Amino acid sequence: AGRFSEVSQAAAIEVFAVVKAFNDDAHEKKVNLSIGAYRTDDSKPWVLPVVRETETAMAADTSLNHEYLPILGLESFSTAATKMVLGENSAVLKEGRATGIQTLSGTGALRVAADTLKHVLKYNSFYFSNPTWGNHKMIFEHAGFTETHQYRYWDAANRGLDINGMLEDLNAASANSVIILHACAHNPTGVDPTQEQWKQIADVIEAKSLFPIFDTAYQGFASGDLDKDAWAVRYFADRGFELMVTQSFAKNFGLYNERVGNLAVVVKDASVIPALRSQVTLLVRGSYSNPPNHGARVVSTVLNNPKLFEEWRTCIRTMSSRIQEMRAGLRERLEKLGTPGLWDHITSQIGMFSYSGLSAGQVKFIAEKYHIYMLSSGRINICGLTTKNIDYVAEAINDAVL
Ligand code: PLP
């Protein structure tokens, strides 16, 4: 037998498995409500016009080449990305207390963050929300964290945030535990803390000397407003916390496969930044050596050019408005059909996802009878809804719940 003959089959990653089932389904009315990507009202991926325009100009620019980027990436990109999340008038930026590192999208930012906290600061305990995005646990465990914890988040009975449970669990965490927070548009629940609740969360994190990481995969995409979606991050930064922000440009720029991300680090004392960057340089060098250029150059060009920046802001408003319309449309239809239960959470939740409250059994029923695919947790990607399929989806949910 060969060396690899004993290798066992690993469990499939659910979201990719569901997409494959959808692709393999020949039914003409099939609907994909699983993958975390934007779709137009024609169920098509959308290349933002501002991205197309920037790429066209890049293709014609013969001064550009394919030389390696520095290990920590394109500086004009990471500086602009850090400014985008901390805000134009950030005191932290004025004091030089933040630095940005280009990463392989949001996932890569989380991995570099985890590697740095584990291998440089020697932290070993991390907390993620129950539930959370399916990759947080694996990223931190693969980086070597051995103390894995969850904090309570979703209150199933009230379809909202279990703030008391969350505060209690954070209160019980040991010092230097890493707390992964979703900056906005919590995945998968679509439920965010209010500003008042963020203050309570900050109080506990401060009192217990915990270390916050803001996973920011949806800035601007959630509400349509970049500043509003960065409120929690800026609140913590202004309060004097040291923290990390892991930014993805997959959703808000529609640059999913270009892997454009930024790890922003906020520190107390600006003088530590060169040493910190030198340590991260070694971690990245021993991992993927240096990041790709294309997507980062697109984002950098747009963020650093006022006219393109305005065009981009129009694009994110287009995406977030369509999502909000589909939320309202689905709720209205379910209420009109008299589907048992309350459906107001569909419009109060924010971002791409809705935690519908459907059970795994109902999800299976809907897939088998209606060829509509969602995750077994009942998470729906609202972007999969269109004016053409929304009646069909509402009827299917009604049939499953009745
Ligand atoms: N974090 C959250 C909460 C997400 O939902 C996602 C994407 O779905 C990511 C991080 C990272 O995605 P990417 O690596 O594609 O930027």
Image: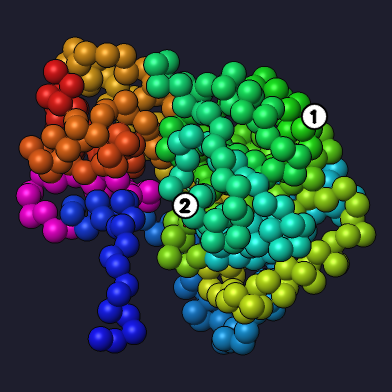
Q: Is residue 326 above or below residue 69?
A: above
Q: Is residue 35 left or right of residue 225?
A: left
Q: Is residue 41 visible?
A: no
Looking at the picture, how far across and down is residue 155, in whole percent?
Answer: 45, 21
Residue in the picture at 56% in, 40% down = 149
Residue in the picture at 25% in, 86% down = 1
Give the secondary structure at mark 1. Answer: helix
Let me know if residue 26 is in the magenta part: yes
Q: Is residue 93 above or below residue 272?
A: above
Disc 2 CB within 8 Å of nearest ligand 1 atom: yes
Q: Is residue 48 left or right of residue 168?
A: left
The foreground one among 199 and 204 is: 204
Mark found first going from the N terminus, 2 or 1: 2
Where is mark 1, residue-wise? 207
Q: Amino acid at mark 1?
A: Ala
Looking at the picture, how far across and down is residue 33, in whole percent?
Answer: 27, 43
Q: Quadrant of the C terminus?
A: top left
